[in-house]
Amino acid sequence: MFIVADQLNGWLSAVSWVILAVVLRHAMAGVAWRKLADDGLLHPYFATTVIVMVAWTLKAGVEVGLGFHFIGATLLTLMFGWRLALVATLVALLGSYISLGGELQVFAANLLLKGAVPVLVSHALLCLAQRRLPHHIFVYIFVNGFFGAALAVLAQAAGVSLVLVTTGAYDGAYLVSDYLAFTPLMMFGEAWITGMLVAIFVSYRPELLSTFDDRSYLTNKAP
């Protein structure tokens, strides 16, 4: 479910549009559409974006603004990088708005919470793992795939809860007992699906993962 206009203060809505504009400007400035086509990832990109869009329309809701669904942000980030992943979540949210209905004034806040936050968290973890951890295939799958997806769900749920508590839409105790209490289940589900797909891609279609480099993760590695 989307955050609705009644749950967001006017000033917070305005701030969210400013933040989104800055993030999107930075992301779009570095999008390599030609490289995406040259690498043969254009069709997989569009197909994955549509799948995520459909997944965002199939959700279980607790109350207005509190919903659970497959995010797909970590998978998008590992497959196409954070810039293209953010654009994909923008398209996915637009499709969800068209299908389910949504209020334009809170579009930016919803995109930041449902797209930008999990995408940037996944990207940050990827960068951290590449710098601090061994370049090993199992590190990529389990840290960036499994744990990254779980962390993305946690970040999204925490962000939504923080906004709704700040605006007074829900009481903090209610969110903890009736929303955040179910978050570990969604974290496990997201981690399992994402980790499984990443493991399959690494094994059979590594070219679908733009953040995975055979020379770095597989060459001269001990069995």
Image (cartoon, helix red, strand yellow):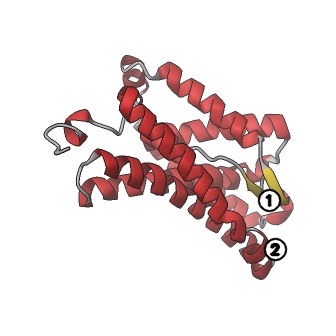
Q: Is residue 105 left or right of residue 70?
A: right
Q: Is residue 87 above or below residue 165?
A: above
Front residue (pair 16, 125): 125
Residue occupied by mark 2? 170
Please identify the quarter of the rendering in which residue 16 is found.
bottom right
Amino acid at pointer 1: Gly
The residue located at (65%, 49%) in the rendering is 111
Q: At 52% from the left edge and 53% from the top edge, which residue is drawn?
A: 149
Q: CA distance from mark 1 to mark 2?
A: 10 Å
Q: Label 2 amino acid? A: Tyr
Looking at the image, which is closer to me, 43 or 13?
43
Q: Which residue is mark 1?
A: 65
Identity of the residue furthest to the front in this view? 223
Taking 131 as reference, is 140 above or below it? above
Image quarter where the C terminus lies is top left
* Structural crowding at the residue carrying mark 1, measured as other residues with C-alpha within 10 Å and reported as few (<14), some (14–19) or many (≥20): some
Residue 118 lies in quadrant: bottom right
Task: Give the x, y percent position of residue 207.
Answer: 36, 27
- Total marks drawn? 2
Residue 196 as seen in the image, left or right of residue 17: left
- Where is residue 103? Give x, y as percent: 82, 48
SS class, disc 2: loop
Residue 209 visible: no
Q: Tell me if label 1 and label 2 are in contact, CB under 8 Å.
A: yes
| 75 lies left or right of 8 | left
Q: Position of residue 123 (x, y in %)?
A: 42, 51
Residue 97 pos. (x, y %): 78, 40
Compare marks 1 and 2 and give the one earlier in the sequence: 1
From this viewpoint, is residue 223 visible?
Answer: yes
Picture residue at 37% right of the left edge, 32% below the top: 203
